[in-house]
Amino acid sequence: MSAPAVTEGELRFRRPLVVPGRLARAVLGAVLGLAGLWVLFLARGTSAGPAVTEPGEFLVTVLDGVTFAGLLFVIASGFTLVFGLMRTVNMAHGGFFLLAAYLAIEIQKDMVGKSRNIEADEVSIAAWILPLLVASGIVALLGVAAQQLLLRWNQGEDLRQAIITVALAVILADQMLAEFGGLAQRAVWPGAVVHFFEVLGQRYATSRLFMLSIALVVGGLLWLWLNRTRMGMVIRAGVDDQEMVRVLGINVTLVFGVTFFVGSFLAGMGGVMGASFSGVAPGTDGQWLLNSLIVVIIGGLGSLKGAVAGSLLYGMVIAFSPAYLPSGYTFYSIIFTFAVLALVLAVRPTGLYGRPE
Amino acid sequence: MSRPRPSIRDAVVVLTLALLVLLPLFGSDFFIDFVMTRTMMLGLAASTLVFLAAYGGMVSLAQWLLFGMAGFAVGNVVAESGRGLRLGWNPWLGVVIALVVVTLASLLLGALSSRTTGIYFLMLTLTYAVIGFFFFGQVTTFSGFGGMTGIDPPGLFSSAPKRLYYAGVVLSALAYVAFRAIGRTPFGLALQGVRDDPIRMASLGFNVPVHRILAFTLAGFVAGVAGILNIWWNGQIDPTSISIGPTLDLLIIAVIGGIGYLEGAWLGAFVFVSANIYLRDIPLIDRIGGVIEERVLAGERFNTVIGILLLVIMLASPEGLTGLLLRIRDAVGGGRGPQRSSTTAALDATRS
C-alpha cells in the first residue's frame, strides 16, 4: 500500500506504544512496594542489612541520600533555572562546575599558605567561604560573558545553542587539563564543620550536614527570589510566555543576563562543594553534567520543585542501591539509576513536574 | 512523486566513491589504515546520527553508545581470555549476537524516548550514553573499567587492513544509499512529516512514536555495524572509549560535516581524523609562538582546536562544511534560489 491510510489497527494503537499509563502506574507501585519490603525485612547479605534489625544503617543511608541530594540540588537548580527561562541547555554547566572547583582549590591554598596536605584544622570558615564566593563569582561572570557573546543573538535555536555550549565545554575541559593537570584534587572543609557524631550506634560526618544546610539556604533564597521579588516574578512570567513579557516593555536581555549569572554561580558553588565532598579531576565535569541531567529529566526541566524532587529521588537511589544490593552485586547499582529514569519517563515523559511541550 | 533527477550532488558522491575504491593503489598503508579506515567507521556511525537528525528531527547522542555496545558484545562472545564472558565463540557468530543485542537495545531506548522530542531527546540520549559508560565500567560481568583486549577479527580480515578498509567503504556506500532511499519511501516521508509537525501527523492517523522507534532502531543497527568494524580494527575496547568525550565527538563530527547532510557524516569524520593526526605537521605552524602555540596548537591540545572549529562553524555556518560547499556551488552555478534545507528542518525541529 503506497498511500498511508488509517486502519483500524492503527487507531487502536493511538496511545503511545511504550507502556500505557495505568499499567506503568501499577508497575511503579509494585516496584516501590517490593523495594520497600526488601529494604525493611529481606535485605540479608547486603552491606546494610534489613532495616528492622539494623535501623542505624538504614538511618545513615537515608542521611547519605538526603545530604547528597543537597549537593545535587545546588548544581541542578542552576541548570534548570537557565533552561526554564531561556530554553538554553547549558552543556558547559559541568565545565563551570569544574573550573570553580579548581579556582577555589587554588585560592584556598593561597589563604592557608600551604600548597599540599592541608588539614581541616588549618582551614577557617573564611578560608572556605571566601574561595567559594570568589570562584563562583568568576565562573558566573564567565557564564554571563559567554551568554552575551555566543548565545544572546541566537536565542530560540535550542540545538544550535546546545552545540555552542558543547564547544565551550570541550575547550574549557582541554584548557583546564593543560592548566591544572590530570591528578585528582580536593578542597578542604573548614575544621569547624569536620566532626563526627553518634546516631543509633553509627558515626556520621557533620560536613555532610553542613553541605545539606548550604543547599537548604540556597533553595530558600532561590524560592524567595523567584516568588517574592519583582525580578523573580518577571522570570516566572518569562518561563510561561517570553514574547508577552517582552511586549510589556520589560528588559528581557537584562533578566536573561542575571539568570545566567545565577545559574553559573550555582554551578560554581556546586563545584566548590563537590570538590570538598569528593574531590575533582578531569572528567568530573562530565559526571556532574550527567547528574544535573538526570535530576532535571526526572524532576522536569525548568521547574525548581522538580529539581528538589529529582535530587531527592536520585540521591536516594545513589545511596540505597549500593547499600542494599547483595554484596558482590553492588556494581549493578548503575542499572537502578537507569531503571528510575525509565520508570519516570514511562509514567510522565516530561518529568515529575515538567509541563507538556 | 517523480524520482529526483541525478544532480551535481550525486555526481560528486559517485566520483568520491570511485576515488575511495581506487585509493589503496596510490595511498600509503598508514593513510589507508589509520586515516581512511577510521574515517569510514566514524562516518558510518555519524551517518546514523545525521539520518535521525535530518529525517526524524531527533539529535541522538546514544549512537556512540550503540557503536560501543556492538564492540563489547563482540568482545564478550569472541575473546577467550581476559575480562568479560570469555565465550571464545566464532567471530561471525559474534557479529550476529552483537547485531541482535544492539538492535534490541536500540528498540528499548527508542521506545523509552519516543515521546520526547527536540532538546529533551538530546539530553535523554546523552544520559543513556553516560549510563552506558558506567554500566560497562562497573558491571565486571561484561567488561569493567579495564576493558577487553585480544578480540580477533574473523580470518578474512585478520592482518589484512585493506580488506577492512574496503569493508568500511562498501558498508558506508550501502548505508548511504539505503538511508537516502528510505527517505523516499512512504515510511521515510512520514518520518519527515513527524519531524516537521508531529501533531498534524498524529491527527492524520500516523503513529508518531512507532515511526520514531523504527527509525531509531534502524539507526542503532547501522551504528552497531560500524561498531563491529571498529572492534575488528582495534582489537580492544574499554569503557573510556564510550565516555562522554567520544560521545560528544560523534556529534561534533556530524556538525562539522553538516548535520543536515548524509555526506557530511563522512566529510566530518575525515576532517576530524586528519586534524587529529596531521595537525602538528601543518607547515609553518611551528613559527607561531607564545600562548597560542602552547595552549592551542601543541600536539596534545587537539580538543581545543576541535572545540574552536566547532564553535566557529556553529557561529558562522550551522550547516557545516557540506552546507558551505553547497552555498559555494549555488553562488558559482547561478543558484536555484533559496531552498529549505534539511539542516534548517533538523534545527527547526528542536525549536520550541
Image (cartoon, rainbow, N blue to C red):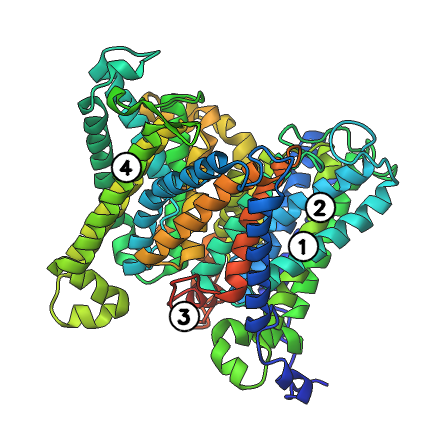
Question: On the picture, is A67 further left or further right than B199?
Answer: left
Q: Residue at x 29, y 53 (%)?
A: A82
Chain for numbered disc 2: B
Residue B302's spot in the image, x, y percent?
A: 47, 31
Q: Amino acid at mark 2?
A: Ala
Q: Residue at x 35, y 40 (%)?
A: A71
Local secondary structure at mark 3: loop
Which residue does the numbered mark 3 point to in the structure image? A356
Q: Is residue B86 above or below residue A34?
A: above
**Extreme residue in the front direction:** A53
Chain for numbered disc 3: A
Query: Mark 2 or mark 4: which is in front?
Result: 4
- Asked if badges 2 and 1 are on one and the same chain, I answer yes
Which residue does the numbered mark 4 point to in the structure image? A269
Query: Mark 1 or mark 4: which is in front?
Result: 4
Q: CA distance from mark 1 to mark 4?
A: 37 Å
Q: CA distance from mark 2 to mark 4?
A: 39 Å
The reply to whether callout 1 and callout 3 are in contact (CB within 8 Å) is no
Q: Earlier in the sequence, mark 3 or mark 4?
A: 4
Question: On the picture, is B293 further left or further right than A144?
Answer: right
Q: Amino acid at mark 4?
A: Met
Which residue does the numbered mark 1 point to in the structure image? B105
